[in-house]
Image (spheres, rainbow, N blue to C red):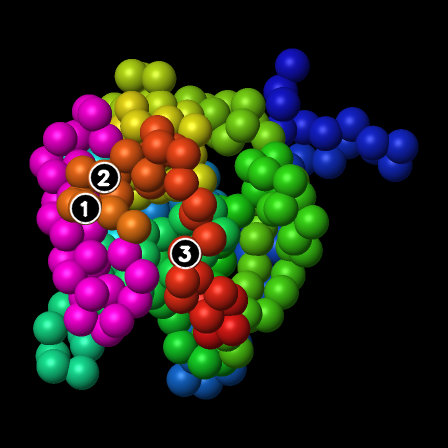
Amino acid sequence: MELLIEKTLIGEINKEEKAIERIKHFQNRTEGKKNIVAFSGGKDSIVLKDLVKRAGVEAEFIYSPPSVDPPELIQYIKKYHTDVKWQPYLKDKEGKEITMWTLIPKKLMPPTRMVRYCCDVMKERTGDEGDTVYLGVRWEESSKRSKLPMVGFWKKKNVIRPIIDWTDEEIWEYIHKYNLPYCELYDQGWKRLGCIGCPLTSNQKLELDKYPVYKKNYEIAFERMIEERKRRGKEVKWEDGKEVMAWWLGETIKNKNIEGQCSFFGD
């Protein structure tokens, strides 16, 4: 049985063809504006990129490096997706690149489930006002995403989610059907690919243990964060970066509502 053929009361629906129809229908035809595929290297963006190509829509494929992606993922993108453009890092007022390691001290706290400033700065910077951005977001991924519409507007951009109703099984069926190369980490049991140490994943500690260099970089950034909090006269509850790391991983019993947290909700 083909998973990508959905049986409904009005007959069968080919989800591949439906996704391609969506891509074509909602493409940006405004002069000077672009169609952009936000490419992460994960399984969903692999499928989306292939569908956009099959749709014949003129689009740019853009990867916004968050500075903490797994090295295997970066190598995979470089090897198999040479047509993907790498978005330059944003720069601060002094002209220095903004990475996760510089962002944490600036924000005075680690990223958390409630305060995900890193996504806004590092990953959600693809496209300009009036552009159309195709995303590989799906309802099945989370309860929050299950409420998203197929078409939306975000930061003055048109946002299209052509495969929003696809399941994990359908994504993998498509990948195997068309022999699309994918990152080796999936074969090692990884269910999602993204920033190492992301507080939204249930494997945060395992990821950091697998990549000790990243863990060390986080601890150094936490040390700088502590110094910056002291410089600004903010409350400091940790002795060093290792203690912040333990708090971040939920290994110590401390109040996570630290001073300065609420300010990020209004940004």
**Position in image of residue 253 (x %, y %):** 40, 34
User: If the image is split into quadrants, where does the N terminus sit?
Assistant: top right
Residue 88 part of the magenta segment:
no
**Position in image of residue 262 (x %, y %):** 49, 65
Task: Kindly identify the amino acid type of the residue bearing the numbered disc 2.
Answer: Glu
Choose between 23 and 265: the one closer to the eye: 265
- For disc 2, the marked residue is 243
Residue beneath the point at 23% across and 31% down: 208
CA distance for labels 2 and 3: 15 Å
Question: Within 10 Å of the Cα at label 3, are there few (<14), some (14-19), or many (20+) other Cα atoms?
Answer: some
Choose between 36 and 126: the one closer to the eye: 126
Q: Earlier in the sequence, mark 2 or mark 3?
A: 2
Question: Within 10 Å of the Cα at label 2, are there few (<14), some (14-19), or many (20+) other Cα atoms?
Answer: some
- For disc 1, the marked residue is 239
CA distance for labels 3 and 1: 15 Å
- Of tags 2 and 1, the one toward the viewer is 1
- For disc 3, the marked residue is 258
Task: State the extent of the magenta-drawn residues as a range.
Answer: 208-236
Task: Kindly identify the amino acid type of the residue bearing the numbered disc 1.
Answer: Glu
Choose between 169 and 103: the one closer to the eye: 103
